[in-house]
Image (spheres, helix red, strand yellow):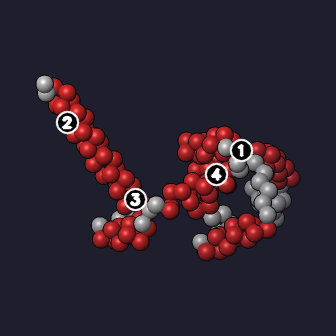
Amino acid sequence: MSDPSDASDNPKSSRTSGQDNASEVASRPTFYMNADLLEALEDQCAAEGNKKRSPFLSELLTVLLTSPIGQQLRENAQKHRRSLAHELECNLILFNEHIPTEEIEKLAQASQRLPDQMLVRLALLGLRVYRRAVARMEADIEASRELP
């Protein structure tokens, strides 16, 4: 005897799940990619334990497609008449050229932080020092104006 809750034996249940799958597929965006990119995606998924979807890639796509940073990248890509991938590549290359990654990794290890956390910490410290230096310069300028 079959279990009525089993979807494979219950025509109404399989029709409902089929309709759910159809509506889910209809709402998904379609991305076309070349063979090299598809292979790189499969390699990343394999590196993360042969998962169907790579958590890293899912997070990256979320950033690119739904975050404020992704929105800014899309606007810049449109403004510069480049693809989103090319805009991201240009931003990463420009940013990475000026960052001493080995030194940041050493600092991160010494302070028991992840490299990205260390980079954020250094940027915030740099901004704080910069603001103080600007405030001192402005105070010096104001003080020199007051002298006769």
Local secondary structure at mark 3 = helix
Q: CA distance from mark 3 to mark 2?
A: 31 Å
Local secondary structure at mark 2 = helix
The residue that appears at 60% across and 46% down in the rendered structure is 73
Which residue is the site of mark 1? 81
Q: Amino acid at mark 3?
A: Leu
The residue that appears at 28% across and 40% down in the rendered structure is 134
Q: Are marks 3 and 4 in contact (CB under 8 Å)?
A: no
Identify the disc placed on residue 140. 2
Identify the disc placed on residue 119. 3
Of the two numbered discs 3 and 2 in the rendering, the one whose residue sits closer to the viewer: 2
Local secondary structure at mark 1 = loop
Identify the disc placed on residue 87. 4
Relative to 99, say whether 16 is above or below. Answer: above
Q: Amino acid at mark 4?
A: Glu
Q: Report the side of 64 relative to 12 (left or right).
A: left
* Sequence-earlier tag: 2 or 1: 1
